[in-house]
Image (spheres, helix red, strand yellow):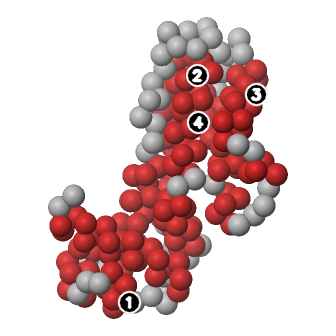
């Protein structure tokens, strides 16, 4: 990583920490510069404004959400193996604490500036579209019966988020979160495939 990229990442991490601690409206660019050990000019050179910095946080969160590196359907591989790989990629991202910190900042700001919800919906839809394409291919191959793949993708991702994201984000204790990830993924995939088996 170049020095300028590393400095930008340090400033962004400091902004996330300050926004979480004091809230967006109560955090100044001076505070962020001090927390990052950077000059105010450097902070402005990288982000332009506090609003620009928040937009960078949104983009960082969205970039980290783009996790389906192995999401293409493989007619030669067992369906459970493919879905487990996809599920684990999604869960590993959702369980990352730095990703959750980004999400906490973004979601708290969304209550005040709902316009950003369109950008987040667009990225979430990108993930679901990739998964829906996988299900559509399995349907065409006759291995699953998925007449509405977009709905099925929403269901699958929703189960993963209920396990690995929402409870941790809000500090809610749920019995499902105490289950080992491999066990949860196995049971979720088994249930999902049974519901859409051909």
User: Which one is nearer the viewer's eye here, 105 or 173?
Assistant: 173
Q: Earlier in the sequence, mark 4 or mark 1?
A: 1
User: Which one is nearer the viewer's eye here, 87 or 124?
Assistant: 87
Residue occupying the point 62% across, 41% down: 157
Residue bearing the label numbered 1: 31
Residue bearing the label numbered 2: 81
Q: CA distance from mark 3 to mark 2?
A: 14 Å
Q: Earlier in the sequence, mark 3 or mark 4?
A: 4
Label 3: few (<14), some (14–19) or many (≥20) C-alpha neighbours in 10 Å = few
Q: Position of residue 93 (x, y in %)?
A: 51, 49
Q: Earlier in the sequence, mark 1 or mark 3?
A: 1
Q: CA distance from mark 1 to mark 3?
A: 49 Å
Q: CA distance from mark 3 to mark 4?
A: 13 Å
Nearer to us of marks 1 and 2 is 2
Residue bearing the label numbered 3: 191
83 sits left or right of 17 in the view: right
Classify 196 as above or below 28: above
Q: Earlier in the sequence, mark 4 or mark 2?
A: 2
Q: CA distance from mark 4 to mark 2?
A: 10 Å
Residue occupying the point 18% across, 68% down: 4
Q: CA distance from mark 1 to mark 2?
A: 48 Å
């Amino acid at each position: 990583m170049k020095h300028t990229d590393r400095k930008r990442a340090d400033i962004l991490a400091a902004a996330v920490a300050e926004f979480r601690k004091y809230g967006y409206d109560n955090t100044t660019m001076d505070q962020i510069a001090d927390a990052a050990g950077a000059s105010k000019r450097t902070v402005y050179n990288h982000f332009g404004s506090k609003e620009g910095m928040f937009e960078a946080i949104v983009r960082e969160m969205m970039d980290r959400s783009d996790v389906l590196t192995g999401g293409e359907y493989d007619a030669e591989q067992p369906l459970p193996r493919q879905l487990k790989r996809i599920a684990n990629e999604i869960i590993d991202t959702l369980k990352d604490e730095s990703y959750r910190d980004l999400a906490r900042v973004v979601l708290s700001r969304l209550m005040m500036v709902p316009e950003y919800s369109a950008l987040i919906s667009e990225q979430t839809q990108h993930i679901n579209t990739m998964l829906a394409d996988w299900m559509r291919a399995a349907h065409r191959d006759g291995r699953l019966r998925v007449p509405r793949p977009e709905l099925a993708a929403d269901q699958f991702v929703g189960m993963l988020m209920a396990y690995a994201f929402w409870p941790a984000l809000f500090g809610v204790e749920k019995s499902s979160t105490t289950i080992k990830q491999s066990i949860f993924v196995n049971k979720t995939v088994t249930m999902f495939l049974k519901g859409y088996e051909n």
